[in-house]
Image: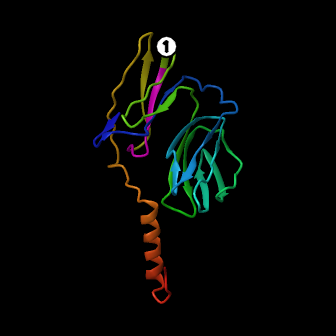
Amino acid sequence: MTDANGVLVDAVVSLELPHPAAASAGKMLEMDQVNSQFVPAVLVVRTGTSVRFPNNDQIRHQVYSFSPAKRFELPLFQGTTAAPVRFDQAGLVTVGCNIHDWMLGYIVVLETPYFGKTGSDGRVQLDAPAGTYTLRVWHPRIKGAAVGEPLVIARDAVQRKLTLQTTGAAPVVASPDERVRALQDKFRRADPKKPHP
């Protein structure tokens, strides 16, 4: 999978069934916080999946989502564990941190067992039985709604090469040290009389 800038990493590819599949039973996944970033930045789950949000940073985070598919808020201190969040409704869940507004992650909740995420080579492989599906692709930078097209799988393997229209180059995330320096500079400008380290 590509866009105008080349290989498209972290694109969610799914094969939707004519009727939603039963929810996942008891599956547990994680979206961690490492260096003030969500890891992975894009997580794909089936409906019924629970997600833990461990904090492996030395600082506090407050993970939240106001997305219609799932609303929640979790104060997370380093070394403490919050209860997992169960995702029962299909849709896109945008995750942020109330303390560190640059932190952004996505949880894509699907009603199909046939999904994957493109790797560093822009490829994904889905193992699905013969049948009629809707091939869907989602990426944070796709213009408009998720791309969808009918797909019929016979006995032989099916390959698709897709080029998507995206909203520009991938965002460059500043390192934690650069963000701390920027925040310190902001405080210095706000109150130049106070000494700062």
Q: Position of residue 75 (x, y in %)?
A: 66, 59
Total labels drawn: 1
Left or right of 41 on screen, residue 121: left
- Taking the spot 53% from the left edge, 26% from the top edge, the residue there is 114
Q: Position of residue 133 (x, y in %)?
A: 48, 22
For mark 1, does the 10 Å Cα neighbourhood hold few (<14), some (14 to 19), or many (20 or more) residues? few
- Taking the spot 58% from the left edge, 62% from the top edge, the residue there is 98
Name the residue nearer the viewer: 110 or 1. 1
Q: Is residue 5 magenta?
A: no
Q: Position of residue 30 (x, y in %)?
A: 60, 43
- Taking the spot 69% from the left edge, 30% from the top edge, the residue there is 25
Can you say whether 170 is above or below 6 in the image?
below
- Taking the spot 57% from the left edge, 57% from the top edge, the residue there is 57
Left or right of 174 on screen, residue 7: left
From the image, tell me which residue sits under label 1. Answer: 130
User: Magenta segment range?
Assistant: 133-143
Q: Secondary structure at mark 1?
A: loop
Name the residue nearer the viewer: 140 or 177. 177
Res. 1 image quadrant: top left
Res. 166 image quadrant: top left
Can you say whether 127 is above or below 50 in the image?
above
Q: Is residue 137 magenta?
A: yes
Q: Position of residue 20 (x, y in %)?
A: 60, 27
Name the residue nearer the viewer: 107 or 192. 192
Res. 156 image quadrant: top left
Residue type pointed to by label 1: Ala
Can you say whether 81 is above or below 19 in the image?
below
